[in-house]
């Protein structure tokens, strides 16, 4: 059936902020969907609260709503736009849950809107544990024995029947949130209580343990004619017990015979039929017993998932794109295969290479968190690599993680094989390297299997890699043959250098002298059976290269690698925009990146895509291949975050032209002494500071400039290792804690700054072409200085700064841009304390806020930056119409206000004893994502940001207040207002006394550690008797006091405010929230801006 | 446990040489070089008699991971003349494995080559067409390039070859119905796979597997309800005897079903021509449209030749068997993938409903065959 004629407008629901378990893979899928639908002439309406995404760019939809993904907001959008259909299957679990909520609230019916992509019934069958279990049995497959429990008592009874360990899985949660293994009753009580709370239906599934079984996934697609294809099979290297998002996975499956694989395929097809997915995709997870082959179906998702993004990148089959086409009525055989153009999408891709995905964790950000891997996903990102064999793909993937110690190595190892094996019994970040060391130290493959249950084939591959390492180390000389053998097994120059006692440049030189260089193969869906028209390449030490010559001027864009806290989708946004802008300007764009979740690694985004690790070696080889096939004008490094920036010096040293700001200028901004001189010359102030290379010099400097101090390692992103320290003991403690991470040393000095208490922090994103400064936006932080800018809420335009302040900021930014020698983007962080403007830091690169600024003010910063790097001036870009004439420093007073709020992952992490980790913000960034609220004034915008990030603010109920002495004065008015709005107030004794003296009725509750016989605040929160928590700590010890209160609030999903600025904003928001929500699209805001500008002319 | 590093070379008739390492047996072997794109099922491929006379190259890089077992043998031995892979497995990891791949290759004296740029070879064949080739390893590796090329060029071309007698059973045998018996079928063994026989037996037929040299009167004398032609190697244009046999049987009114080579022979019997494809269809991901249902089947294919018939109209059989239509065609390149006679009880498909290796999407064809035979018998009684 061709495309349905009765659908002319579609509302696409996005996935909201990046959280663990739901990352930018849904930006990739949503962006694809929007492009497909628009290409079909359908009016696309989009809702997503995440401003960092590419899909929320006004270019990708006809009406883009950056609004909370709640039934209330979506209903307002539906009422306004009256779409024919809603497509929820490309926005992860968030969108699917929103669709179900819309259906249940009768909103879809009320406005006569059809759900496309998946029917409600299908969603329910896939996600309801009991329905699904019966369905699997109907499909003739098996499931783990299980029971559904609605109470803890029930759960305890079932656990005894099943025998420990049992698996606990809450219904309707994403990324396995709340699930885990219970080895005893104590575990069970904890996990079940938590799971019942997480599950919107208050139910958990208890299941027989299948720990150690082999785990597989199939990605399937089905159309209305019942045509079903398996797009990809994925095998988990880590056996059952580790969440698939945290597992090392490989595509295609490598240890199944054809009858076993076909059995999984048959079961998969039967399940997708029974579930009733008939216009889209689904993924199904299987466990296979290693000794008997018994197959158990673990779960299925009737939507595009993280695995489908991986499968799309792994095979070249664009699942999201095809899913969008199926949703509007096409059949698989009516859709052409993008890559071959001549064959249809109704086929099953076949691979002549191996793809390995490895997860990226952020445990270093949460030192108290339990780092063992379980069925709850904990990774924050992933890297994928493609190789002609598994060893190569694995080694490339591991080095793509850009993390010290993530690759196999052959240096000193003091631990014995037995010790290493013991450690590798527990799955953790880096277990595969521990296993490699164990094998290297003499553990047998059989022992390794016994300890890890990793399939012997995968273990042998590590043995093979160790054997090749031995060959390399023991070869009489590093000859062509030895180099080739090493390269054919994925060894990097760094690894070879380590094995031979050489340096990386020496190995590179030797390799180039001997012409041992990679060729580039193509991902083509068909193993070479048909010619591929899409230049999607990966490296291989093989014979024939497939890079086609080109006579266009090429620009290489370095992406930002795996997502991590501090470097996520925001940087991909900038890279993608640069690619679009430079393509439009007539260049051939060449993208290099290794993150399968992103839009940048969609083969549709750039003229050429290289799926390669972002190490100097891998990037140099790509550039070499491109130079061999045409003219490379230069490389863009200022958009891909620290990953790309970190390559600048190395590329430059190899004679590669860097576009825009030079590597020397980048160093100038990073190097404290040089930067101070720039500030001095411009008459700008920085907080008193110094640099230290060890603990003693740090103490000396801190005592000299006075406590509190802010300490910060240089050359890090996301405030890694950044802390506020209050005394000398704190400095010593700090050095002890960071000791193992090698982030401070003679080459990487520690910056020690006087910490500005009670200052307002300001972030500026600007463009500079060498002559003209163009301000993108001036953002005012809502939290006090000291909270990392990535974790702080901020408002654009600023709401408390005077125009004189903004002028000072502008002048200072210009001076810095000029002094550093910026050509392209510049981000500067300022603080205003006691009327004095301080420069905190300057980064001559794309910042995390570039997409937020672009959307809030309608200024395409990243596109403009890429053009400036190519030599176009700001004046020319204004003349061309790419940039508005008025920059972002002046915003008319009737313009909308945008508030960005951070989303934090505290709930994901538990200490080994099961406690949640502390939910306090500091100078080290901890958030995984962000949302934006945009509305006509600050309280409304802030309210939306809170709804989008945490759910609606309460408009009545009980507020708990406990503030530091410093804040006691300021808290009176906001609390008074809360009581006027009808809130009951409870407070700890000190705060209560002060509020009572101001005539505010207040009930006293005990602190957590007070043994007074009355209820403690933690108990109140746990009993759901508190709706709002205000707790401002001050000083390090005071911070510790509030730990239980804050964790209880996070655990109970209560709004938590830890600074006075947040409290004031929240109270104003609660005030306006009672009026209900109005929604406005970015396009409408733009129209109003255009009208204003028109009127001004 | 170790990977061998003794040199070997793959030499193509156009002079292209690919260096690799010896794999399986050592020595020299010749044949038509073809590539197969399945990611699973190397054992079924190796033991499929249709590959007799061919050097098969797997495009999937890792081969041998799951070893070999008796249950997945599609015939009594490995039939490929040579085997080309990129990364042979050093260990076997599968609960059903009984031997390693290398064990079986050495046992059946199959010369192989590994560690070469198989993708480059695939692209070469795709652009230039399937061609004759030789693998030289061990002592043969040392012979001169000129001599090696000359020997490759001496190999007879696949076009025009009749290979049926090489693979067919010499003696007839019967596999009894494995479900309630409904009748019997004569299976002409042109290189039949074990799975095909098993699926026919599973549909309630006693399967009389007969040598390819059997005559039409002998087939009719078996007293079976239907005739089946299997897959097999060779050029259908060189199989006149089988075509004649089929025409005679069809004239008798006996129902017929053919697979692969059997499809080409039905095409010829009906009066159509056959032709050699540039590089063939060999994979387990091939989309085929069933014209009648409008549904797509993902099929297992292995054919270098195809029937020349129009895919969009019903045509009169030039040999007088009534109206014929193309029932299935490839969605990749619109090659004929199935024939259906509208006036007699005969149909055939170019692909492999028995899969092995491959998807089970087309198993319904065995049911269709059963239904046709039963309906035909009922019709005959009335």
Image (cartoon, helix red, strand yellow):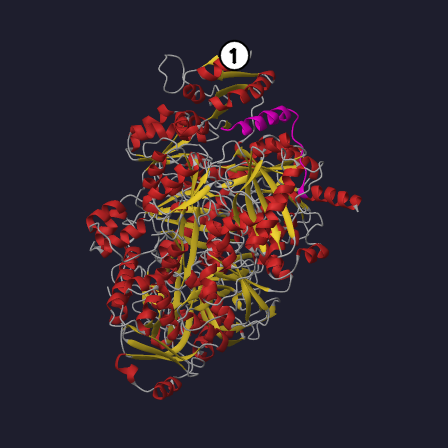
Left or right: where A527 falls relative to A435: right
Q: Is residue A826 above or below residue B157?
A: above
Q: Nearer the viewer, residue A184 or A758?
A: A758
Give the magenta range.
Answer: A1058-1082
From this view, report whether residue A554 is shown above or below residue A414.
below
**Label 1, residues with CA under 10 Å away: few <14, some 14-19, many ≥20:** few
Q: Position of residue A936 (x, y in %)?
A: 68, 34
Can residue B256 be seen here? The reply is no
Report if residue A200 is visible in the image: yes
Residue A289 lies, with reference to residue B149, above or below; the image says above
**B213 or A297, nearer to the observer:** A297
In terms of image quadrants, where is residue A735? top left
Foreground pick, A70 / A676: A676
Residues B192 and B301: in front is B301
Q: Is residue A385 magenta?
A: no
Q: x and y percent of residue A261 in the render?
A: 38, 54
By secondary structure, the bulk of the magenta-drawn segment is best described as helix
Residue visible at 69% across and 44% down in the picture: A1083
- Chain identity of mark 1: A
In percent of the image, x 51 and y 20: which residue is there? A968
Q: Which residue is mark 1?
A: A996
Where is residue A519 drawn, in percent x and y? 44, 69
The location of residue A757, given as percent across then percent down, is: 49, 32
């Amino acid at each position: 059936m061709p495309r349905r004629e009765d659908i002319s407008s579609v509302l696409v629901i996005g996935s909201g902020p990046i959280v663990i378990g739901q990352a930018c893979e849904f930006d990739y899928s949503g962006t694809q969907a929007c492009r497909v639908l628009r290409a079909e002439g359908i009016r696309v309406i989009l809702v997503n609260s995440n401003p960092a995404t590419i899909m929320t760019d006004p270019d990708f939809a006809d009406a883009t709503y950056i609004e909370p993904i709640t039934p209330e907001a979506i209903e307002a959008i539906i009422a306004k736009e009256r779409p024919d259909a809603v497509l929820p299957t490309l926005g992860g679990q968030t969108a699917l849950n929103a669709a179900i909520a819309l259906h249940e609230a009768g909103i879809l019916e009320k406005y006569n809107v059809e759900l496309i992509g998946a029917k409600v019934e299908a969603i329910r069958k896939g996600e309801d544990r009991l329905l699904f279990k019966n369905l699997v049995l109907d499909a003739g497959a098996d499931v783990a024995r299980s029971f559904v429990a609605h109470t803890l008592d029930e759960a305890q009874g079932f656990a005894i029947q099943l025998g420990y360990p049992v698996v606990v899985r809450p219904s309707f949660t994403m990324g396995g949130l709340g699930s885990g293994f219970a080895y005893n009753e104590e575990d069970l009580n904890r996990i079940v209580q938590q799971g019942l709370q997480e599950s919107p239906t208050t139910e958990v599934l208890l299941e027989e343990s299948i720990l150690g079984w082999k785990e597989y996934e199939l990605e399937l697609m089905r159309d209305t004619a019942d045509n079903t294809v398996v797009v990809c099979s994925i095998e988990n290297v880590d056996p059952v017990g580790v969440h698939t998002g945290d597992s090392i996975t490989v595509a295609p499956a490598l240890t199944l015979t054809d009858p076993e694989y076909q059995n999984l395929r048959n079961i998969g097809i039967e399940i997708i039929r029974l579930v009733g997915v008939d216009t889209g995709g689904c993924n199904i997870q299987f466990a296979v017993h290693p000794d008997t082959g018994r197959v158990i179906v673990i779960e299925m998702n009737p939507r595009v998932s993280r695995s489908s993004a991986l499968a799309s990148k792994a095979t070249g089959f664009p699942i999201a794109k095809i899913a969008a086409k199926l949703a509007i009525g096409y059949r698989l055989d009516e859709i052409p295969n993008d890559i071959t153009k001549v064959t249809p999408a109704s086929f099953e891709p076949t691979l002549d290479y191996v793809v390995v995905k490895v997860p990226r964790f952020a445990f270093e950000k949460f030192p108290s968190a339990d780092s063992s891997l379980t069925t709850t996903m904990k990774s924050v990102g992933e890297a994928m690599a493609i190789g002609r064999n598994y060893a190569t793909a694995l080694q490339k993937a591991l080095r793509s993680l850009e993390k010290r110690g993530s690759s196999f190595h052959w240096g000193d190892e003091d631990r014995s094989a037995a010790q290493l094996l013991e450690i590798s019994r527990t799955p953790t970040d880096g277990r595969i390297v521990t296993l490699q060391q164990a094998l290297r130290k003499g553990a047998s493959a059989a022992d390794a299997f016994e300890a890890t249950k990793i399939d012997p084939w995968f273990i042998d591959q590590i043995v093979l890699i160790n054997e090749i390492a031995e060959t390399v180390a023991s070869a009489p000389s590093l000859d062509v043959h030895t180099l080739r053998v090493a390269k054919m097994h994925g060894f990097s120059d760094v690894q070879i250098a380590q094995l031979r006692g050489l340096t990386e440049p020496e190995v590179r030189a030797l390799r180039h002298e001997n012409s041992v260089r990679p060729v580039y193969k193509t991902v083509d869906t068909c193993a070479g059976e048909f010619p591929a028209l899409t230049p999607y390449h990966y490296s291989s030490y093989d014979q024939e290269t497939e890079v086609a010559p080109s006579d266009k001027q090429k620009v290489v864009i370095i992406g930002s690698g795996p997502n991590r806290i501090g470097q996520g989708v925001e940087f991909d946004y900038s890279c993608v925009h640069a690619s679009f802008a430079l393509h439009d300007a007539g260049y051939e764009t060449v993208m290099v990146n290794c993150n399968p979740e992103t839009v940048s690694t969609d083969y549709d985004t750039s003229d050429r895509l290289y799926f390669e690790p972002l190490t100097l070696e891998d990037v140099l080889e790509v550039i070499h291949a491109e130079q061999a096939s045409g003219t490379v004008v230069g490389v863009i490094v200022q958009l891909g975050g620290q990953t790309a920036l970190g390559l600048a010096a190395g590329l430059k040293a190899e004679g590669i032209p860097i576009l825009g700001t030079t590597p020397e200028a980048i160093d100038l901004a990073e190097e404290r002494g040089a930067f101070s001189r720039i500030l001095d010359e411009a008459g700008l102030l920085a907080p008193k500071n110094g640099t230290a290379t060890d603990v003693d010099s740090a103490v000396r400097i801190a005592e000299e400039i006075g406590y509190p101090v802010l300490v910060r390692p240089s050359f890090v992103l996301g405030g890694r290792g950044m802390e506020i320290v209050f005394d000398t003991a704190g400095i010593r403690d700090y050095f002890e804690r960071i000791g193992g991470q090698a982030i401070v040393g003679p080459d990487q000095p520690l910056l020690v700054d006087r910490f500005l208490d009670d200052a307002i922090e300001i972030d500026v994103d600007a463009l500079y072409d060498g002559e003209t400064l163009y301000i993108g936006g001036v953002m005012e932080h809502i939290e006090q200085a000291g909270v990392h800018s990535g974790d702080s809420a901020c408002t654009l335009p600023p709401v408390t700064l005077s125009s004189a302040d903004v002028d000072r900021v502008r002048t200072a930014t210009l001076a810095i841009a000029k002094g550093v020698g910026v050509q392209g983007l510049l981000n500067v962080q300022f603080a205003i304390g006691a009327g004095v403007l301080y420069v905190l830091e300057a980064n001559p690169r794309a910042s995390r806020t570039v997409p937020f600024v672009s959307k809030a003010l309608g200024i395409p910063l990243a596109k403009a930056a890429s053009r400036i790097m190519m030599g176009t001036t700001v004046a020319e870009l204004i003349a061309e119409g790419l940039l508005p004439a008025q920059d972002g420093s002046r915003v008319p007073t009737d313009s909308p206000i945008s508030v960005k709020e951070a989303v934090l992952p505290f709930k994901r992490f538990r200490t080994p004893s099961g406690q949640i980790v502390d939910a306090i913000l500091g100078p080290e960034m901890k958030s995984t994502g962000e949302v934006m609220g945009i509305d006509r004034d600050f309280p409304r915008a802030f309210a939306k940001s809170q709804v989008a990030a945490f759910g609606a603010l309460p408009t009545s109920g009980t507020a708990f207040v406990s503030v530091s002495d410093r804040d006691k004065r300021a808290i009176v008015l906001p609390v008074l207002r809360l009581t006027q709005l009808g809130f009951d107030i409870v407070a700890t004794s000190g705060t209560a006394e002060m509020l009572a003296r101001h005539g505010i009725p207040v009930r006293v509750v005990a602190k957590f550690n007070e043994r007074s016989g009355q209820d403690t605040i933690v108990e109140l929160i746990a009993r759901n008797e508190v709706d709002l928590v205000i707790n401002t700590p001050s000083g390090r010890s005071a911070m510790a006091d509030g730990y239980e209160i804050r964790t209880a609030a996070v655990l109970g999903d209560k709004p938590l405010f830890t600074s006075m600025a947040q409290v004031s904003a929240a109270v104003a928001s609660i005030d306006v929230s009672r009026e209900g929500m109005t929604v406005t699209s970015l396009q409408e805001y733009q129209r109003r801006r255009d009208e204003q500008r028109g009127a001004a002319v | 446990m170790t990977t061998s590093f003794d040199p070997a070379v793959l030499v193509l008739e156009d002079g292209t040489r690919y260096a690799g390492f010896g794999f399986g047996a050592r020595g020299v072997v010749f044949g038509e070089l073809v590539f197969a794109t399945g990611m699973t099922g190397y054992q079924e491929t190796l033991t499929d008699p249709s590959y007799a006379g061919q050097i098969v190259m797997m495009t999937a890089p890792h081969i041998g991971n799951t070893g070999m077992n008796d249950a997945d043998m599609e015939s009594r031995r490995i039939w490929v003349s040579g085997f080309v892979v990129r990364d042979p497995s050093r260990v076997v990891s599968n609960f059903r494995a009984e031997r390693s791949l290398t064990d079986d290759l050495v046992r059946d004296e199959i010369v192989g080559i590994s560690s070469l740029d198989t993708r480059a070879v695939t692209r070469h064949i795709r652009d230039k067409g399937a061609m004759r080739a030789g693998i030289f390893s061990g002592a043969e590796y040392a012979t001169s390039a000129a001599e090696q090329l000359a020997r490759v060029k001496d190999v007879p071309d696949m076009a025009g070859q009749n290979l049926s007698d090489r693979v067919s059973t010499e003696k007839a045998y019967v596999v009894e119905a494995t479900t309630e018996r409904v009748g019997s079928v004569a299976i002409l063994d042109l290189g039949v796979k074990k799975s095909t026989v098993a699926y026919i037996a599973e549909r309630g037929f006693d399967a009389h597997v007969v040598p390819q040299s059997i005559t039409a009167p002998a087939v009719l004398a078996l007293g079976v309800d239907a005739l089946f032609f299997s897959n097999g190697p060779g050029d259908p244009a060189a199989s006149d005897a089988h075509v004649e046999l089929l025409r005679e049987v069809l004239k008798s009114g006996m129902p017929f079903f053919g697979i692969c080579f059997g499809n080409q022979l039905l095409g010829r019997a009906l009066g159509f021509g056959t032709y050699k494809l540039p590089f063939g269809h060999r994979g387990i991901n091939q989309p085929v449209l069933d014209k009648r249902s409008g549904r797509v089947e993902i099929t297992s294919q292995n054919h270098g030749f195809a029937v020349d018939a129009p895919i969009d109209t019903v045509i009169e059989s030039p040999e007088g068997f009534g109206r014929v239509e193309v029932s299935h065609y490839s969605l990749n390149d619109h090659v004929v993938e199935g024939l259906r006679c509208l006036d007699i009880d005969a149909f055939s498909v170019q692909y492999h409903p028995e899969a092995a290796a491959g998807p089970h999407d087309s198993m319904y064809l065995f049911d269709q065959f059963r239904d046709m035979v039963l309906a035909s018998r009922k019709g005959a009684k009335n």
